[in-house]
Amino acid sequence: MLHIHFSTADLSRIRIAQEPDPAWEILLSLHALGGPADHVVFGPWKSRTLPRLDSSARMLFALAPPRGYSPDFLTPAGTPDLHSAVDAVLSTRRGRLRADLAQLAGRRRTPSWTRLLAEGDAETMRRLGSALHGYHDRVLAGRWDRIRAVTDAERTLRGRDLLDGGVEKLLGGLGPQTRWESPVLRVDYPVDQELRLRGRGLRLIPSYFCWRRPITLLDEELTPVLVYPANRGLHLLTGPGRPGRTALARLLGRTRATVLEEIAQSGGTTGDDLARRLGMSPASAGSHTAVLASTGLISTHRVADVARHTLTPLGLAMIEGHLPTDGPPTDAPPTDSPPSDAPPTDDPSIDDRPPGAGPPGPSH
């Protein structure tokens, strides 16, 4: 069980990440690729993604096994875009590299090059940076708008919780694996960990690839974060094809379908912007968004006099052409294995903790 201890000051310093975090999405997608081939959400994506990886991905799989510990330095704080995230990773202090890689080596066999990485060897660090950029380009860049749409929808829901019920509803709505018992947030976790915020606040990071339970960093002295699942099983990166404009228009009406698609493509927009882009009156745009909001396809969040519309997970599912399901996708993938340096899921050196859980404390 993870216990996150809040002071009064911490409660006023809770922040929700404005954008999907590229470092966390890289790390957690690596966990997903190393996980089960028949995963209900990630299975089809995994079967299509693994063949696209080049040999540089082996370096990343070695640092980010699907179960157990992954080094904290792979997910630096305050990096809103890929370039700043990679720069921060490559600027990691040597002491941090040594400590984190020693943690990793204490839990599993590691390649010989990790000793060079621990010393900040320039060529090994360059290879790591190149691998991170290449992986993002091959695996995530083409899907980033969809990932952003999922995290935006989740951020909107959490903002609504905060406005409707304060911090208690915000922290109590992070998912079934969390429970708010003031002043402690209790998280179902594979190891026992106490995280005392001590006035630093907490940054909440909704993540597409975080699955099942939230995770945090191993080192309590680092900037406190809680990464939690934004994808509540309603949105697949691959799966049945989009329904197309004609099918969506038959269901919603042509203009309303166009409004929904515009909100999806923009990642969230105001009524005035929507009216301007679609060439309709603000009153007409407001009428259509009111219907979409009443049916749960979009969420409307008002700040001062400006209403911003974003897709809900259900609206996202509608756009993508599938409905929520409790079973595996119909296009179940063949079983694939990660590149050779990625430990197979039945490797005895890997414990039975779920992806993202690192003994003996919380980790990636």
Image (spheres, rainbow, N blue to C red):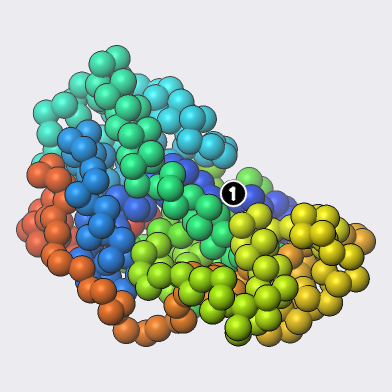
Query: Is residue 246 or residue 36 the one in the foreground?
Result: 246
**Which residue in the rendered view is the most extreme toward the top?**
122
Examine the rendering and report whether any part of residue 34 can be seen: yes
Viewed as shown, does residue 67 lie left or right of 226? left
Which residue has dot 1 on it? Answer: 19
Q: Split into 4 quadrants, where in the image is the N terminus?
A: bottom left
Above or below, comparing residue 138 to residue 330 in the picture: above
Query: Is residue 15 or residue 130 the one in the foreground?
Result: 130
Seen at 53% across and 37% down, the residue is 81
Viewed as shown, does residue 177 lie left or right of 134? right
Amino acid type of disc 1? Glu
Viewed as shown, does residue 136 lie left or right of 283? left
Percent coordinates x, y for residue 261 in the rendering: 63, 65
**Which residue in the rendered view is the most extreme toward the front?**
246
Above or below, comparing residue 212 to residue 266 in the picture: below
Helix, strand or loop under label 1: loop
Percent coordinates x, y for residue 177 in the rendering: 45, 74
Disc 1 residue crowd, few under 14, some 14–19, many 20+, Cα 10 Å: some
Q: Answer with the quarter of the image where residue 339 lies.
A: top left
Seen at 20% across and 21% down, the residue is 116
Query: Is residue 33 or residue 139 the one in the foreground?
Result: 139
